[in-house]
Amino acid sequence: MRKIMVANPKGGCGKSTMAIHLASWFARCDEVVYVADLDRQQSSRQWLAQRPASLAPIRPWEPNAEGVYVAPQACSVAMLDTPAGLHGKALKKLLDAVDRVVVPVAPSQFDLLASRDFFEELAETKAVRKDRVGIAIVGMRVEPRTRSYQQLLEFLSQFDLPLVTCIRHAQRYVHAVESGITLFDSNGQAESDREQWQPLLDWLVTRR
């Protein structure tokens, strides 16, 4: 089973967009996918409720009676969409339960500064230091060859964290969130946008 957490303490950086697109891609690959929405806004859960039944199924992942998220036995991909402000014991507990962490980061100065303590905490966590959990950074709403992209690279160089890919801003993502679909559920027109996801998808399926 692949256990993937999408996390960043900053709200509005694209965590839910990231989680639902990854879940959709794995579902299209015939994986049995469950998504847990730990965020107060419940964006991923609302998206799941709107998802057309004709598309590859993605199942909501509910906590047990003790409030613990235990992946169902049939699950092959477990996706955690985490809340803003995740840190401390709650972060360490989740890191002990996953294999990969995807951190979407917007290139604005406010977003970078808000992520600094989170990156430092990640680096100090035992599971990460022992290389048991892989970390991937994804630039959100950013284009290479721009000043904001260079600022993102310079910022990440302080933490020795890999920038795996960048996802540009596109209206298609807004439409996806509103309609229960993703770019991976459509063909043709979104090909150039889907290509930006490929380095991250390759990283997620590579065995550690």
Image: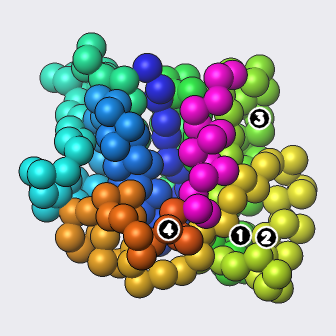
Q: Could you tell me which residue is drawn at 32 percent across and 40 percent down?
A: 27
Q: x%, y% of residue 157? A: 89, 57
Q: CA distance from mark 1 to mark 3?
A: 18 Å
Give the amino acid at mark 4: Glu
Q: Residue furthest left?
A: 53
Residue for badge 1: 112
Q: Are marks 1 and 2 in contact (CB under 8 Å)?
A: yes
Frontmost of labels 3 and 2 is 2
Give the amino acid at mark 2: Leu
Mark sitting on residue 191: 4
Badge 2 local density, few (<14 within 10 Å), some, or many (20+)? Answer: some
Residue 82 shows up from this direction: no
First in sequence: mark 4 vs mark 2: 2
First in sequence: mark 1 vs mark 2: 1
Principal SS element in the magenta part?
A: helix
Magenta span contains residue 151: no
Q: Nearer the viewer, residue 153 or 165?
A: 165
Give the amino acid at mark 1: Leu
First in sequence: mark 3 vs mark 2: 3
Q: CA distance from mark 4 to mark 2?
A: 25 Å
Residue for badge 2: 152
Q: Are marks 4 and 2 in contact (CB under 8 Å)?
A: no
Residue for badge 3: 124
